[in-house]
Image: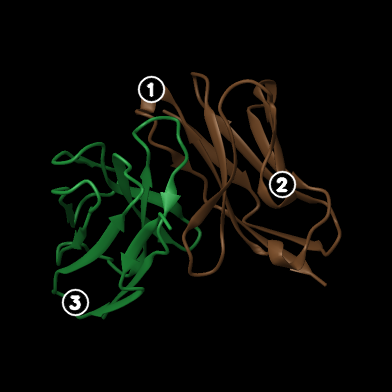
Amino acid sequence: AQSVTQLGSHVSVSEGALVLLRCNYSSSVPPYLFWYVQYPNQGLQLLLKYTTGATLVKGINGFEAEFKKSETSFHLTKPSAHMSDAAEYFCAVSVQGGSYIPTFGRGTSLIVHP
Amino acid sequence: DGGITQSPKYLFRKEGQNVTLSCEQNLNHDAMYWYRQDPGQGLRLIYYSQIVNDFQKGDIAEGYSVSREKKESFPLTVTSAQKNPTAFYLCASSIEQGPYEQYFGPGTRLTVT
């Protein structure tokens, strides 16, 4: 069975600083990995996804993530935080053995200070 | 615009009453999902459906029921057997069941007192 761990339920950064949200997964087969963002009282929206091929994935709003198989990680980064980036971020993993039903992490709340 | 609609946005019920949450999509997606979200818990899968007239239990199906009579609709009923029904409920769809992104509705916040 697959699992996802997001380190840090809250991450606080200053506006303009680097954003790093950590995601580690566990899977015995090649994973498909996703990052979603959720603004208060709204549904989730896809930021980016890794399926196969290039391990550095670029998404919307300047975010990117790198799939590192050796570290079983898929950390999300953004060079410079904006106030509008304040939201909840979810990492998810999907595998063939699990009928591709995604398993979500518990989420990381990004706080951006002026 | 294509998307997923959930209604109502907020729902209040008395304990012991069944309540049905609506989920409609016009994306022509085959697969649909219901999740429950509680603070600090992430998303937990309640039910999912790959095609019309077929659905499967997720991790926390007890106290819930669904139907999938039409491709575009996947209503969720929260029954009186659900011990802690107060939560934020999210409906999602994907083009089919596979390694594809999910599209989410805006959610329904259910409060049971």
Q: Which residue matches tag 3? A: B15
Disc 3 or disc 1, which is closer to the eye? Answer: 1
Circles 3 and 1 in contact, beta carbons < 8 Å: no
- Chain A: its colour in the image is brown
Q: Residues within 10 Å of mark 2 (few under 14, many from 20)?
A: many
Quick one: B69 or A96, which is closer to the camera? B69
Q: Which residue matches tag 1? A: A97
Q: Secondary structure at mark 1?
A: helix
Q: Are marks 2 and 1 on the same chain?
A: yes
Q: Quadrant of the N terminus of chain A?
A: top left
Q: Chain of mark 3?
A: B
Quick one: B4 or A10, which is closer to the camera? B4
- Chain B: its colour in the image is green
Q: Chain of mark 1?
A: A
Q: Secondary structure at mark 3?
A: loop
Name the residue type under label 3.
Glu
Would residue A32 appear left or right of A81 to someone viewing this image? left
Q: CA distance from mark 2 to mark 1?
A: 29 Å
Relative to A62, does residue A113 appear above or below in the rendering?
Answer: below
What residue lies at 32% left-to-right and 52% top-to-bottom?
B26
Q: What x and y, as percent, mark residue A26? A: 53, 29
Q: Secondary structure at mark 2?
A: loop
Name the residue type under label 1.
Gly
Q: CA distance from mark 2 to mark 3?
A: 43 Å
Quick one: A101 or A108, which is closer to the camera? A101
Q: Residues within 10 Å of mark 3 (few under 14, many from 20)?
A: some
Would residue A90 appear left or right of B14 to someone viewing this image? right
Quadrant in which residue B8 is drawn: bottom left
Q: Are marks 2 and 3 on the same chain?
A: no
Q: Which residue matches tag 2? A: A63
Circles 2 and 1 in contact, beta carbons < 8 Å: no
Q: Residue furthest right?
A: A16
